[in-house]
Image: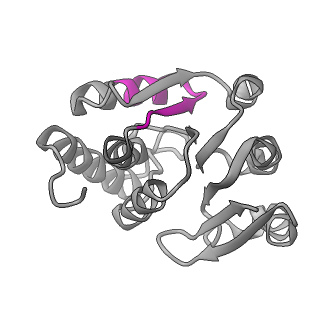
Amino acid sequence: MFHDVPEPVRRRMEELERRDAADRLDGTARLDRLRQIPPETGRFLALLATGAPGGRWVEVGASAGYSSLWLALACRDRGWKLTTFEVLPAKAALARETIEAAGVGDVVELVEGDFLAHVDGLDGIGFCFLDAEKELYAACYEAVIPRLVSGGLLVADNAINHRETLQPMLDAALCDGRVDALIVPIGKGELVCRKS
């Protein structure tokens, strides 16, 4: 999977990595920055996703589609499809551009809109990556966990670097009898939950 990344995917990943690095240095406003995961988190997600049970694959918070590219590698490996949600129109346009430029439209579907407005039709989730506005994490967690298949995974980004904001949700997840959960110190910290 990592040894044969298609050239269009690799090129787009590198382009987004450069832009993300520049955004962090040049004073780009917070909501205008890509705010994407680092490459090591992308590899971690792809590895986790390939081991997820059957079911829908969902991403909440596409931004420019960088994490979608990592998950697309896993989708191709497993024969699954990813549905990614992005509520901000400018970010959705970037994600659409990424999906097209990388040639992953066969395995990645972008939904422009609020995940929580669409969640009722998303039962049987095998894998979910959550990387949205932190104030929404608790509501997204509570919407996803009941919809996970047995053994299904929910991974939430920023569990360490936004720990103060996310602490109530993290505490609830770590004590939630419906899942086995831990925080993995990779990238910005990943909360990994596996449904019992």
Q: Position of residue 7 (x, y in %)?
A: 12, 43
Q: Is residue 60 visible?
A: no
Q: Is residue 157 visible?
A: yes
Q: Is residue 153 magenta?
A: no
User: Is 112 placed above or below 144 here?
Assistant: above
Q: Is residue 91 magenta?
A: yes
Q: Is residue 179 left or right of residue 7?
A: right
Q: Residue at x 54, y 47 (%)?
A: 30
Q: Is residue 80 left or right of residue 172?
A: left
Question: Outermost residue, left direction?
Answer: 7
Q: How is the image coloured?
A: one colour
Q: Quadrant of residue 113?
A: top right
Label count reads 0
For the residue pair 171 and 46, the one nearer the viewer reads as 46
User: Is 156 placed above or below 59 here?
Assistant: below
User: Is 135 placed above or below 159 here?
Assistant: above
Q: Residue at x 35, y 51 (%)?
A: 20
Q: Quadrant of the N terminus?
A: bottom left
Q: Position of residue 45 (x, y in %)?
A: 45, 59
Q: Quadrant of the C terminus?
A: bottom right
Q: Position of residue 163 (x, y in %)?
A: 71, 70
Q: Residue at x 21, y 50 (%)?
A: 14
Q: Which residues are magenta?
A: 80-96
Question: Outermost residue, bottom direction?
Answer: 185
Q: Position of residue 77 (x, y in %)?
A: 32, 47
